[in-house]
Structure formats: C-alpha cells, structure tokens
Image (tube, helix red, strand yellow):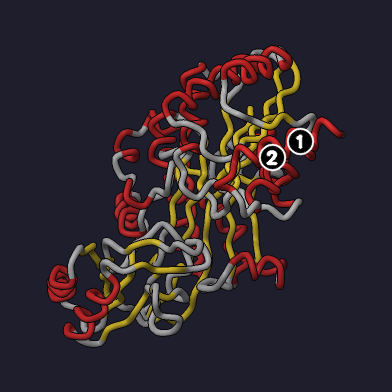
Amino acid sequence: MNIHEYQAKRLFTEHGIPVPTGAVAASAQQAAEVARASGAQRWVVKAQIYAGGRGDGHFAGRETGAGGIRFADSLAQLERDAADMLGNTLLTEQTGPGGREVEHVYVEEACEVERELYLSMLVDRETSRVTLIASARGGIDIEKVAVDSPSAIHKLAIDPRDGLHEAAARSCIAKLRLEPGQEAEAARIAVALYGMFTELDASLIEINPLAIVRGGQMLALDAVIAFDDNALYRHEEIRALRDEAELRVGELAASHHGLNYIKLDGNIGCVASGAGMAMATVDAVCLLGGKPANFLDVPPDAPVDRIKDACKLLLADPDVQSILVNVFGGGIMRCDHFADGILLANREVPLKVPMVVRLSGTNATLGRQRLRDSGPDVVFAGDLAEAARQAVSAASDTRLLERKSWWRRTQQLLQRG
C-alpha cells in the first residue's frame, strides 16, 4: 500500500524526521492560503499522485511544459500553478499511458539547497534483512546511479536482534563524507527511519533528496513510504490513509477481497494459483510479445468465492481482450475447485473475451470436464507455453466480435495438433 507525499511527511514529523513547512490543498485558493500562512517568500507546488517522476512528467494534452513540481516566487504564480495542476491528468514514467488525475497539491516552503543526499530503508531480498541504503548522489534516479556508479551506493544490512544504533548507522553514513555534525544528524535520521520501518510494517521508506540546506540543517525534501499489505490488519490508522481514487481498475475491489492484484497496462488478463506461478504467467506472456493487463495470484487455500472474485476482476476489466488461467493443483489446491470459481464468476459477469485455461495436477481432468459441461467456451492448453501463445494470439485477433468463430477455429487447430 502506498500513501501520498504529504501523508508520509506527517509520519516523518511524528517520528522526528525534519521536513520543510508545508500543507496539502484541494483548490488553488487553499494553496494560496497555505502559502500565505507559511510566511515564506518562495514555495514549491507538488502534484500528489501515487507515482514518481512528477517533475519530469507532463500533463495530458501537452507534450511539453511544466510538470508536476513547480517553484513559485509569488502568491499569484503559485495560485496559477495549483489551478493548472488540479483536475488535470499527469503522466510520468511511472503512471503508465493513462496517467493520474491530480486531486491535491502539496505546498511547502522552498529551500536553498547546498547538497542532496539519498537515504532509504527497505527489505533486501538477498540478505533477508532490513537494509539501510545511503548515497551522496541524491536528487536523481537512484536506479540509474546503481547501474552507472554502483560504488556510490552504500548498504548496511541490519541484524534484527540488534536493531540499528547510531554507531552502526554512522559507519555507513561516514562514506558520504559529511561534516561531523551533519554525519551525526544523518545517522540519527537513519535510526529514526529504522524505528519507523519496523513499527509501521513498512516495505520501503525513501528520502530523495535528504537535503543539506543553507545553515547546515538537514531536511527531507521528498518522502516515499510503502507498507506491507499483509500487515495492514495491525494498522487501521495506516489503512485509513489509502486514497481509493488513486487505485486503478480492479485494485480497490481486490483490496476488499484480500487478493494480491496489480493493474498493468496490457490487454491480457492473467490469473494463477500462487505468486510464483503468477509471475511465471506474466513472464510467459511478455516473452511471447504480449502485454499483461495485471498480476493476480490466488492463494492455494482460497475458497471458491475468492476464486470467483478473482476471475470477476478480469471479466469486468474493459482493457482485457483475452484471459489466461494457469493453475497447478497440488497440496491443498484442486483444479476442479478453481474451475468452480470460474463457473460462478461467469454466472455473474458473463465471459465476453477468449479464455485460455491450463489446468495441471490434482483433479485437472475433473476441472476441465466441469468447464466443458457447464461453463463458457474456453480453450484448454496442455502447458504454460501453449497457453500463453493462445492468449497472446487471441488478444491480437482483429475479429474479436466473431468470438464463436474464433473458438471453433482454435478448437479445430488444437484437435489437428
């Protein structure tokens, strides 16, 4: 789960991490009032969306022009900038082609920055530990820095038995070559980040940049926090921060049904039994030149109703032009159980696009028979490669309105081998 920058900065303040003076606004008039109350002479206006790259982005209908982060030297300019952002769609490298509509802007005091650093806390899959990451090259794309200058990225894996103490934090921060007072402050902020990370069950906390401003003070000029969805039941106060307007097609419904669903920008709906199988399904579609419309895994112990809800997400998605079902029955997952979920979904949201089904393992034959006897027209595939080929072909078929003919043609080809 993600939250907006202004929400993340509130949490920073609560945990002792310094941020510039600022507040959120839903109208240009409110933005001007926030700026006036700050007492500053120069401000930054930031579009609030669940995506990065705002400064380099552009608004729909404008290939050039100012993006989603702007500096204003007057209240009149600030009000114009806020009005220009609010209600319009911002496109960045992370939003996808549909962009995100800006419903709020964050107005904060502009700072005179002398140096920009990078500081974050995340779970490192290689070490299976929460890890502090620091770099003297803040303010730019950290992924690019990692590729071009890996020596500029410094990591500290944290032993969960010991936690993070300032002495350990300083051993990592020292590589940024700061003045003694700044090094101590950066280490203190790192310790605060770790406490925040573990207390709130975060999956990522990032400050980029952590700025040294005129006078030597350190301020978090940007704030990104993502939370572990599996731990939200422990944090109702965090769950309440979710901006449902920012969720894409299906994501809100998926969150209500407890499904692991991520909306993507393609046209092939994918559903599989388990996260590993779901990743393999998405990879197979991409390998064959297709574009997945989503990532969706159904846990092996999911009841039929949850399988039904998962399938309904794909059936109701207007972007989906074909559906790929990839299920391996093993342990507590049964293929006939999954077939029942497909049948229930089809009763509530009738299938209107080609569906390719690969069932393998426990009760696979029974599951296929139930779909043949009672379900919609589906194409059965023997393995993932064949299933992915069929789904990609179906999504690119220009005669989707003649689906019955498509099914007959596909079934004939399969029967011929």
Mark 2, residue position: 281
Q: Which mark is residue 144?
A: none
96 sits left or right of 12 in the view: right
* Three-letter code, disc 2: Thr
Q: Earlier in the sequence, mark 1 or mark 2?
A: 2
* Three-letter code, disc 1: Leu
Q: Is residue 106 above or below residue 156?
A: below
| Residue found at the very far bottom of the displayed protein | 73
Q: Tell me which residue sits at (44%, 31%) in the image.
A: 349
What is the number of callouts on the image? 2
Q: Residues within 10 Å of mark 2 (few under 14, many from 20)?
A: many
Q: Position of residue 232 (x, y in %)?
A: 40, 33
Q: Position of residue 247 (x, y in %)?
A: 39, 48
Q: Which mark is residue 384?
A: 1
Q: Residues within 10 Å of mark 1 (few under 14, many from 20)?
A: many
144 sits left or right of 9 in the view: right
Q: Between 171 and 269, which is closer to the camera in this rendering? A: 269
